[in-house]
Image: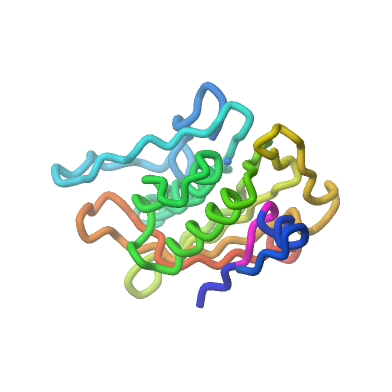
Amino acid sequence: MNRRRPLSAALSLTAALLLAGCGSGGDDTGKDSPAGGATASRAPASPTATPAPEMSLPADLKATFEDAEVSGDGAAALRDAENYARAILHGIAAQDPKAAPVHHYSVPGSKAEEYAEFQIEKHAEAGFTLTGERTHSRATAEPKAGGVVVTFCSDETRVRGRSEEGDPITFFEPDDPKNLWFWTIDMVNSEKDEERWLAKNTEVESGATEQCG
């Protein structure tokens, strides 16, 4: 069941605006290594594959992913789980819940798509985006019936918000455990493109010191 937990920015919005519910940047945006690191091999695209939409981030927002020792379907699922997480940042930066990358990497009508749209919508409604760097580590990819379960940690210690007017918004102090988030994403193979994996369900736990501390 999708827990629809907010990320740090949305959690800050909850406190400030009583909202209910529940980063690759710079000049090299869009050129991050695939999930599983440089050792994760990619098969040639299927002739029927849908081209991946552009997924850029502003120069002051970056997402980095630590290499992981996974292979085969696990590496491919992890790659696109990371793309899904990056797509949410892209949508927040673009202030667009319908941003193409979100829907390219999630199952239509799924809990994962709902979670991504929710996060982006709340940022857009509040009129602010994110700056800084979100780091991701400790990735795993385990097969399950019908797909692969991907987990990883994200650390938002160096993430800040920025309003439309350019005013900075501080979330949590560097040593606050709420900076640590544990992601669990159910990934399934696309029926239309065997090289692409899609997020079907997403659970994100805040204050994840046990898994990520």
Which residue lies at the image location 83% right of the left edge and 55% below the top edge?
176
Percent from the top left, x then y, of residue 164? Answer: 65, 37
Residue 48 left/right relative to 55: left
Which residue lies at the image location 64% right of the left edge and 57% below the top edge?
7
Query: Quadrant location of residue 8?
Result: bottom right
Q: Nearer the viewer, residue 122 or 81?
A: 122
- Whether residue 6 is visible, yes or no, is yes
- Whether residue 70 is visible, yes or no, is no
- Classified by dominant secondary structure, the portion drawn in magenta counts as loop
Which residue lies at the image location 79% right of the left edge and 44% below the top edge?
170
Highlighted magenta segment, given as a residue range: 5-9
Against 3, residue 27 (above or below) is above
Residue 125 left/right relative to 80: right
Percent from the top left, x then y, of residue 128? Answer: 64, 43
**Quadrant location, the C terminus:** bottom right
Q: Nearer the viewer, residue 161 or 71?
A: 161
Residue 145: say if magenta. Answer: no
Against 124, residue 20 (above or below) is below
| Residue that sits furthest to the bottom in the current view | 1
Percent from the top left, x then y, of residue 204? Answer: 60, 64
